[in-house]
Image (spheres, rainbow, N blue to C red):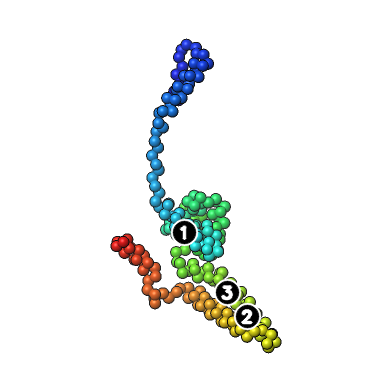
Amino acid sequence: MNTVFPSEPLSETQARTILFQNFLKDEKTPAPMMPDPPRNYRLEAELLAADAMGDIIEHWGFRKCLGRIWTVLFLAGEPLPAAVIGERLQMSAGGVNTAMHELQRWAVVKRVWKPGERKDYFEAETDFWRMISKVFEQREKLLGESVLGRLQRAQALLDQAPRGSVPQVTRDRLRRLLAFILLAKTTLDAFIASRRVDLTGFGDLVRFPLEGLRRLKEHP
């Protein structure tokens, strides 16, 4: 605010009047307009995809941030340091570090070394089936073995029960339940052992939906 005082001494009332008039004059002068920063389409898309995958991971019982970090690394297409990941996702260094240890334990992210760099870099596992099989092997398989063991003990208890003390429908349905879990465990074990799923009978399940989207855009 440019305030000009006359050379003659002013009374307090006159000084206040001049200050107020100068204030009103400055208020009428519009502030210079600052240009809007350019829109970062890549970052917007990256964060949107990261949140989507984070929701899926959270639905599976993992922390949402694990899915968000993996997505950022996957979309980057190159190793990134932890600081860059934290900046993009607005996460603390400690939070990123903890998540990285967990992601490496599940073998969906790995630490890599870049020549001339002292800091750690990380890259995402890009083989979807390998990731799924690893999770199945470390979590679902253990849960399946635990469930199977308890059902087998339940079956042994009914086998020891005196005849007529347990309804036949209970015995039959426990056998059906046990048979189903055995079948599920056998299928899961075969999947883990093969490390792949044969989808030839279903066509290209990856390319088909993408081709459908492309045609939909061309012919809405």
Amino acid of disc 3? Gly
Residue visible at 48% across and 19% down? 17
In percent of width and height, residue 199 lies at 41, 74
Tag 1 residue: 52
Residue farthest to the top, as pictured: 8
Q: Contact (CB < 8 A) between labels 2 and 1?
A: no
Q: CA distance from mark 3 to mark 1?
A: 28 Å
Left or right: 207, with 17 as reference point: left
Tag 3 residue: 144
Residue visible at 57% across and 56% down? 98
Amino acid of disc 1? Ala
**Lower position in the chain sequence, tag 2 or tag 3:** 3
Q: Quadrant of residue 145?
A: bottom right
* 185 in relation to 107, above or below: below
Q: Secondary structure at mark 3?
A: helix
Q: Quadrant of residue 167?
A: bottom right
Q: Secondary structure at mark 1?
A: helix
Left or right: 220, with 34 as reference point: left
In percent of width and height, residue 117 lies at 48, 52
In percent of width and height, residue 174 lies at 60, 81
